[in-house]
């Protein structure tokens, strides 16, 4: 009964493969990267939850639980999962319309749907997203991240930043009079430090011969291996705290970090409620799938790890989104900014993502009072540095090397991501990709005259005769109708690689025109696919020749 169905995707987490040959050096790199991402993810998780109309702990525990599960069970080596900015508008709308309880049900239902998408091998469909769309999307995200951090970098007194691009620019311009030079100095020092810190390896290589003490050399090497963001957060936080600088901190804005493990609670499931939430469920699932697999593709381009397994990644995303609602969490997906931070920090396996989750858990449970004093300007500096590194800015310079189709898809995706919405940008990019592909394929198809007498005309068909190219059959029809005598038409299809039903209809219209004038239509050199369609439709019996 089920012999015709494709086999289900095997459940094989990438972690099992990456642990083969795992050593202390890889563990050290993963520990450093995980700790860095964990610290960077702390304010983001809280901010995403608050902006979505939820409590800060919803974002924190989503990052902890979903982040751990996605790394442990996923199909990528370096992707970081958690709450994402793309979900803010969607989650806020669901909370406003259906309430928090129903958001949890929709998230869990979306998790089940995501798992099924991966199980039935539908994750590979996202691989068809053009690279120009991915680059435009990524660069747009980088710009939005950078723009969102200007308030804290400049220390502006803005109670709540608008969600729209132009609204944010307007808010920043109207509050420039509240510029805080001390906050700007902290953020600037952070960015400068992050730029200089990795270059301490150069100090090691240049001055190794001048330093006689092996202990000093080892100390320089060990110190330079510490994650730059961690060093920046610790040193600049101590500086701001010891000097009592009047800058905004995590504590002053968010009231500190809530401590304690959330209670396990079952949402009030019912069939009627699930039916009511079909649209929110589909929205969460589809956006989560697109976000996570696009993020995985970005990770493939930036990192040296093996390519991701999209089906395994969707199954992991599904499990994570099914579990987190029982702890009051929000939807989770792959996060580009944190994933790029993870890669830039030296991660080599999913262990880094698991360490990221454990770091967040440790901060929430043990070190919340210490995080209270972290200046937001320092965090803004970290995120600005991340945004700059994640952007593929050289691609804008290289645009002149590519076709107008590539430029249109990349630039339009980039602009729509910034001005409108991430989901709209992906949708527009895909629509443009399809439209431009159809146009290009239609340009490839040709119907060239080969020989012509008063009684017969021979044409050779090139490319694919499909719905986008059928207009190129019209000149042959016009030639037949203009002929003063019956005209036999022979089509050489040896260079025609494919045919669709619209193309078949165009051939039938040509046959009618030829037959009406008393001539005959024949085709030779058919490839298997066009021949199969012509024979199955019964058109072959009406042709004079079909070889």
Image (tube, rainbow, N blue to C red):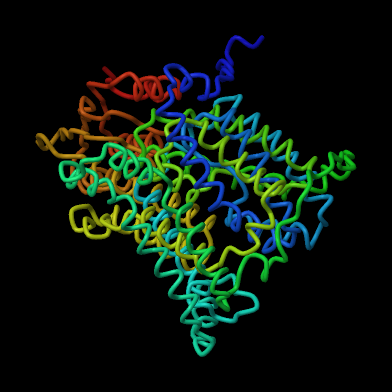
Please tell me which residue lies in front, 474 or 99. Answer: 99
Please tell me which residue lies in front, 281 or 168. Answer: 168
Identify the residue shown where x is 66% and y is 9%: 1
Q: Quadrant of residue 250?
A: bottom right
Numbered-mark total: 0
In the displayed structure image, the side of residue 429 where residue 376 appears, left or right: right
In the displayed structure image, the side of residue 489 where residue 138 appears, left or right: right
Identify the residue shown where x is 22% and y is 35%: 462
Extreme residue toward the front, this view: 213
Q: Position of residue 390 (x, y in %)?
A: 39, 53
Please tell me which residue lies in front, 405 or 470. Answer: 405
Q: Position of residue 307 (x, y in %)?
A: 40, 30
Identify the residue shown where x is 43% and y is 37%: 347
Q: Position of residue 395 (x, y in %)?
A: 27, 55
The C terminus: image quadrant? top left
User: Eyeballing the image, is 367 above or below 114?
Assistant: below
In the displayed structure image, the side of residue 103 where residue 511 appears, left or right: left
Please tell me which residue lies in front, 533 or 542. Answer: 533
Q: Quadrant of residue 361?
A: top right
User: Eyeballing the image, is 181 above or below 478?
Assistant: below
Q: Position of residue 419 (x, y in %)?
A: 48, 69
């Amino acid at each position: 009964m089920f012999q015709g169905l494709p086999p289900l995707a095997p459940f094989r987490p990438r972690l099992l493969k990456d642990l083969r040959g795992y050593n202390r050096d890889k563990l050290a790199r993963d520990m450093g990267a995980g700790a860095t991402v964990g610290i960077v993810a702390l304010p983001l998780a809280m901010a995403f939850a608050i902006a979505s109309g939820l409590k800060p702990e919803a974002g924190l525990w989503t990052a902890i639980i979903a982040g751990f599960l996605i790394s442990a069970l996923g199909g990528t080596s370096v992707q970081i999962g958690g709450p994402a900015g793309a979900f803010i508008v969607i989650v806020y709308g669901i909370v406003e319309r259906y309430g928090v309880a129903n958001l949890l049900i929709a998230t869990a239902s979306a998790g089940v749907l995501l798992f099924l998408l991966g199980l039935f091998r539908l994750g590979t469909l996202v691989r068809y997203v053009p690279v120009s769309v991915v680059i435009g999307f990524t660069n747009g995200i980088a710009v939005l991240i950078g723009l969102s951090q200007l308030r804290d970098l400049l220390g502006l007194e803005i109670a709540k930043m608008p969600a729209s691009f132009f609204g944010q620019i307007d808010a920043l311009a109207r509050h420039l009079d509240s510029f805080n030079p001390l906050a700007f100095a902290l953020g600037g020092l952070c960015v400068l430090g992050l730029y200089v810190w990795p270059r301490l390896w150069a100090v090691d290589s240049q001055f190794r011969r001048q330093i006689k003490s092996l202990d000093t050399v080892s100390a320089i090497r060990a110190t330079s291996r510490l994650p730059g963001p961690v060093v920046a957060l610790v040193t600049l936080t101590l500086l701001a705290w010891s000097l009592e600088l009047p800058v905004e901190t995590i504590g002053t804005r968010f009231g500190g970090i809530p401590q304690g493990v959330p209670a396990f609670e079952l949402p009030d499931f019912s069939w009627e409620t699930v039916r009511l939430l079909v649209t929110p469920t589909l929205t969460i699932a589809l956006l989560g799938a697109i976000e996570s697999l696009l993020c995985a593709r970005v990770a493939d381009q930036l990192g040296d790890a093996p390519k991701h397994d999209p089906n395994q990644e969707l199954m992991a995303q599904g499990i994570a989104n099914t579990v987190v609602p029982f702890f009051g969490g929000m939807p989770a997906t792959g996060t580009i900014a944190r994933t790029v931070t993870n890669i830039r920090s030296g991660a080599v396996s999913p262990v880094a993502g698991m360490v990221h989750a454990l770091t967040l858990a440790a901060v929430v449970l043990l070190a919340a009072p210490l995080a209270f004093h972290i200046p937001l300007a320092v965090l803004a500096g970290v995120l600005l540095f991340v945004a700059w590194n994640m952007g593929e800015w050289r691609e804008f310079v290289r645009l002149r090397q590519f076709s107008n189709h590539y430029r249109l898809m990349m630039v339009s995706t980039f602009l729509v991501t910034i001005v409108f919405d991430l989901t709209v940008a992906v949708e527009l990019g895909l629509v443009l990709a399809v439209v431009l592909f159809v146009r290009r394929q239609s340009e490839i198809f040709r119907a060239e005259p080969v020989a012509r007498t008063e009684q017969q005309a021979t044409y050779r068909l090139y490319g694919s005769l499909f719905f986008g190219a059928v207009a190129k059959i019209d000149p042959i029809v016009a030639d037949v109708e203009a002929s003063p005598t019956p005209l036999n038409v022979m089509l050489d299809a040896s260079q025609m690689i494919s045919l669709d039903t619209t193309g078949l209809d165009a051939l039938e219209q040509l046959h009618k025109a030829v037959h009406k004038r008393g001539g005959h239509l024949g085709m030779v050199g058919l490839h298997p696919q066009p021949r199969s369609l012509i024979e199955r439709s019964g058109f072959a019996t009406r042709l004079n020749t079909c070889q």
